[in-house]
Image (cartoon, grey):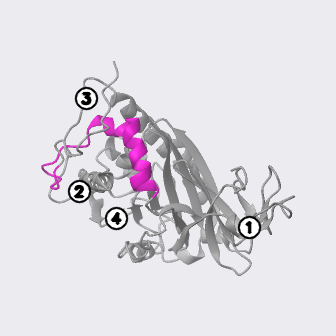
Amino acid sequence: MAKPQVINHDFSDGFDRDPERSSTLAAPYYFDPAVYEKEKETIFYRSWNFVCHVEQVRDIGGYATAMVADQNIFVIRGKDRVLRGFYNVCQHRAHELLKGSGKRKVIACPYHGWTYETDGRLKNARNSQDLPGFNPGEFGLKPVQVEEFSHFIFINLDPGAPSLNSQTGELQAEIRSYVPHLDKLIYALRLRYDIATNWKNAIDNFLECYHCRIAHPAFADLIDMPTYRSKTHGIYSSHTARSGPGDNKAYTFEKSDDDLDFGAWWLWPNVNFIVNPGESNVVVMHMMPSGPETTIEHLDFYFLTEKLDEQQRAVIEYFDKVLNPEDIGLVESVQRGLHSRGYHQSRYIVDRDRTELSEHAVHHFHSLVLDALKG
C-alpha cells in the first residue's frame, strides 16, 4: 500500500532550526508528486540555475541549452555581444528551437521555419505578410534572466529575482583561493547520468562526509580526512580538506607546492563546484530533477590544458568509474528505502566541531527547502 500524499503538509514534523535537536525531512518529501510540483514553482522557477561556462558562449551566435525542471531554456550571444536567455520554444506552435550547444547566426524553427534574431526579435514568419492584424513585435521570444558568476552562466525564470552575485557573499573569493588559475581553465567534457532518485537525496549525499570512510575508501585516502570541515553560509556551503598523499587509491599526482587542496562548494539549489587535489581543475556537478524520483546529473570537467594529460584522464576516470557509481548506488538504495513502511524520518548526526562526521550542512540545505516550500 502506498504512503499517503502530503499535499496539505505543514512542513514542520520534528524539524528544528538547531541541527543538533532536529529531525530530518520526512520520507514523503522525497517521492510525493505534490511536493515535487510545489518545488518546481517555489524553488527551480525562482532560483539561479547553472547552464555552462562562459567560454562555451563567448562568440557571437554561441548558444547553450539547459533544462530547469521541465522548462527548456537557451542562452545565446547576440550580435551586440550581449548574452541573453530565452524560453526554448517557437512562438508559433511551440516547437523547440535549439538542441545542445553550438553557434547560430539566426534562430530557425525546424517545424514551420519561423526565424528569430539572436536578440529574440521575430525576423520572419513565413506567409504572414498579408495576415490581418499580425504584429511581428508581439511574437518575440520570451526572455529569462541571465547572469555570469565566476565565469559560469546562470539563468533565472523569475524576472524579479535578485542577482546571484548579491546573494553569494564570499563564495567567489573562496573558490578562487583554492584554484587561483580559475580564469584560465578550459572546458574538457561533460558526463551525464540518469539516476533513480529524488534530487534532494542526491544533494544530501554530497553535503555530508559521514559516509565517506565507509562508502568511498579511495576518496578517504585522497584527502586528509581529519581536516575535512563543512561550513554553511546563506545560500551555499563549503566543504574543504587538506590533500592526502600523491600516491593514493583514487589517482596519482606529483606532490608539489602548486598542488591544490580539496575544496567543494554547494550553491542553492542544485549545483556543486569541486576542486580536486593535484593540478588546477574544477568539476561542476549539476543535479536537475526530471521527476519526483528521477534526477539528471551532469559532471563538467575544466582543466588548464585543452589536451588531457595522464593525471587529468585519471581524475575523469576516477569520477566516472569509481566515485560516482559508488554514490549512485547509495542514493538509489536510499530512494527505494524511503518507500519502506519501516521508515519515516530520523535525526541529523551533528557534532560541535562540525567534523567530517557531522550532517549540519544537510540540515542547512533542508532549512532552505522548507523555507521555499512555505513560500
Q: Nearer the viewer, mark 4 or mark 1?
A: 1
Instruction: Give the residue type at disc 1.
Output: Asn
Q: Nearer the viewer, mark 1 or mark 2?
A: 1
Instruction: Give the residue type at disc 2.
Output: Thr
Whether the magenta-drawn stretch holds residue 235 is answered as no
Q: Viewed as shown, does residue 240 lie left or right of 322?
A: left
Question: Badge 2 is on which residue?
Answer: 355
What is the quadrant of residue 27 in the picture?
top left
Q: Which quadrant of the rendered structure holds the C terminus?
A: bottom left
Whole-angstrom CA distance, mark 2 to mark 4, is 20 Å
Report helix, strand or loop for mark 3. loop
Question: Badge 4 is on which residue?
Answer: 235
Give whichever of 262, 358 is nearer the camera. Answer: 358
Neighbour tally class for label 4: few under 14, some 14-19, many 20 plus, Cα within 10 Å: some
365 above or below 62?
A: above
Kindly tell me whether residue 270 is visible in this rendering.
no
Q: Viewed as shown, does residue 97 lie left or right of 352?
A: right
Question: Tag on residue 186?
Answer: none
Question: Tag on residue 135?
Answer: 1
Span highlighted in magenta in the image: 16-45
Earlier sequence position, callout 4 versus callout 3: 4
Whole-angstrom CA distance, mark 4 to mark 3, is 29 Å
Question: Tag on residue 343?
Answer: 3
Q: Nearer the viewer, mark 2 or mark 4?
A: 4
Report helix, strand or loop for mark 2. loop
Instruction: Give the residue type at disc 3.
Output: Tyr
Neighbour tally class for label 2: few under 14, some 14-19, many 20 plus, Cα within 10 Å: many
Give whichever of 338, 263 is nearer the camera. Answer: 338
Report helix, strand or loop for mark 4. loop
Q: Nearer the viewer, mark 2 or mark 3?
A: 3
Earlier sequence position, callout 2 versus callout 3: 3
